[in-house]
Amino acid sequence: WSGKSGQCLCTQESVMALPILSLSQTHLTLLETCPRRFQYIFDQALAVPPTPEGQDAALWGNQFHLLMQQQALGLPVDVMATADRDMTAKVDALRQQAPQLFESNPPDPHERLRQSEHQRTLAFNGYLFKVIYDLVVLTEHSGLIVDWKTYLKPPPKGRLTHDWQTRLYLYVLAETGGLAPEQLTMVYWFVRHQDDQGKDLPPSDYRFTYSLQQHDQTRADLLLLTDRLSALRLRGEFP
C-alpha cells in the first residue's frame, strides 16, 4: 500500500494467494474506523466481553429476532413468547403499525420471495461478503430489506445513511437479486424505543431508497477497503 499515491501495490496473483476471508458490515466498519480492533475480531483471545447492560440488550434483541423469524414460519406468537408479554406486545404493535410486514393469507401472488433470516453471499475482490437480512421481500419489480432494531434510543437517520449495514445490504441485493438499484428499499424498524422519560413509543421506521450513483460509490469504497486490507495482510500485519 502506497501512502503517497493511495494505490494498492499488490498484484492479482499475490492477492489470490491469500486465504479468502468472509467479511460482514461489522468488519467493514472496524476496518474503516479502527483497524486494530478489526484484528481483534480474528483473535478470540483479544475479544472484549460486553457489559452486563449490553448483554441484556443483546439477549432481548436476539429473542425478538427469533420471535419474528418463527412467526414468519406461521407459528402463533402467543405460544412462543408467553414468558415475555412485553415482547409479544411489541410484535402486536408492529403488526398494527405495519401489517404489510406480516405475510398475508393467502400469500401475495406478486411476491416471488418473502423470507426471514435470508442469507446471501457475494464474492468481491478476493473476499466474501456475507449478509443476513432480517426480512427480505422480492417482487418482479421491487426489493424490500427490513431490519429490526431494538435500540432504546434510535441513532440519527443520517448516521444510518452512511452505515456499512445500509450500504452493504443494498449493494449485495442489487448484485444478486436481479433488480436495479432504483428498485430497492431498505427499512429499519425500531420496535423498542422510548422517549426521554423512559416511556414506550409506538414502532417507527427509517426508510432508505437506493440509486445507481450510490451503488457505484459503494463499489468504489469497497474496492478501496478490500485493496487496503489485502495490502496489510501481505505485509503480515493482518490475518
Image (tube, rainbow, N blue to C red):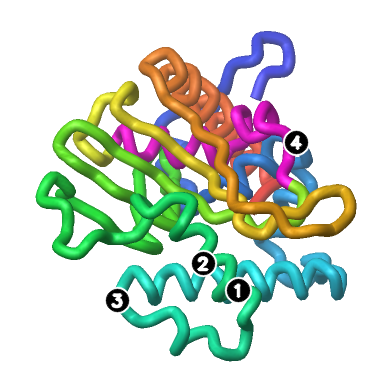
Q: Disc 2 to disc 3, how far (Cα)? A: 14 Å
Q: Horizontally, is 141 left or right of 145 in the view? A: left
Dot 3: element: loop
Q: Residues within 10 Å of mark 2 (few under 14, many from 20)?
A: many
Q: Which residue is mark 4?
A: 33
- Classify 10 Å Cα crowding around label 1: few (below 14), some (14-19), many (20 and above): many
- Above or below for 142 versus 216: below
Kindly indicate whether the residue at mark 2 contacts the one at mark 1 (C-beta within 8 angstroms). Answer: yes
User: In the rendered structure, which disc, 2 or 3, sits on the residue that comes first in sequence?
Assistant: 3
Cα–Cα span, label 1 and label 2: 6 Å
Rendered image: mark on residue 91: 2
- Residue type, label 3: Gly
Q: Which residues are magenta?
A: 154-175
Three-letter code, disc 4: Thr
**Does residue 172 show up magenta in the picture?**
yes
Specify the farthest residue to the left: 109
Q: CA distance from mark 4 to mark 3?
A: 41 Å
Name the residue at 58% across, 37% down.
164
Q: Secondary structure at mark 1?
A: helix
Residue 72 sits above or below residue 199 on the image: below
Q: Main structural element of the magenta stretch: helix, strand or loop?
A: helix
**Residue 113: horizontal and vertical position, in percent?**
21, 53
Q: Earlier in the sequence, mark 2 or mark 4?
A: 4
Task: Find disc 1 in the rendering and name its residue.
Answer: 87
Dot label at residue 74:
3
- The residue sitting at 42% across, 13% down in the picture is 213
* Quarter of the picture holding the N terminus: top right
Nearer to the camera, 45 or 90: 90
Instruction: Confirm or deny contact between disc 1 and disc 4 (CB under 8 A).
Output: no
